[in-house]
Amino acid sequence: MPSFSNDRGMKKWQGFLLSEHATSMESAKNAPKWQDVMDQELIYQVLHQVIQHRANITIQLFKAEGETPDAYIEGRIVGAEGDWLHVQTDAGVKRVDLAAIRYVEERSFQKWYDK
């Protein structure tokens, strides 16, 4: 007697695997990448602009080569003390040593409907 319930094999898992793949691709896209090392003078110019415009900032710190970079420090500069910056992030205020900055970028405001 022939069986009418055909097992489609891996085809029935295709939707699950596709969503897993999409999730891993999204996390890989959002993972921080090493930026080019900026000259100290250029870093100070960008920091000066950020403070004048009261804009958001993205900072990448130095770390041993070969390691994956830490997450960017994103926020707004709320103070400076000697060679330290105080950056207000979503997680709280972080102290950043100026000598440890590898890359810095001014970020403009992003509207919720532009995301």
Image (tube, rainbow, N blue to C red):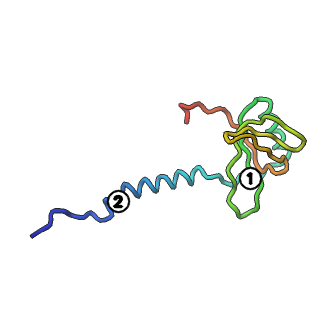
Q: Amino acid at mark 2?
A: Trp
Q: Is residue 33 above or below residue 43?
A: below
| Residue sitting at x 55%, y 52% | 27
Q: What secondary structure is found at the residue carrying circle 1?
A: loop
Question: x, y (%) of residue 13?
Answer: 35, 59
Q: What secondary structure is found at the residue carrying circle 2?
A: helix
| Residue sitting at x 9%, y 70% | 1
User: Furthest residue to the front?
Assistant: 92
Real-space Cα distance between discs 1 and 2? 42 Å
User: Furthest residue to the bottom?
Assistant: 1
Q: Is residue 61 left or right of residue 11?
A: right
Residue 58's disc is none
- Specify the quadrant that holds the C terminus: top right
Q: Is residue 94 above or below residue 15?
A: above
Q: Which residue is mark 2?
A: 13
Q: Is residue 58 left or right of residue 47?
A: left
Question: x, y (%) of residue 12?
Answer: 31, 59
Front-lying residue, 33 or 97: 97
Q: Is residue 68 left or right of residue 102?
A: left
Q: Which residue is mark 1?
A: 36
Snapshot quadrant of residue 34? bottom right
| Residue sitting at x 69%, y 54% | 70
Q: Amino acid at mark 1?
A: Asp
| Residue sitting at x 21%, y 64% | 6
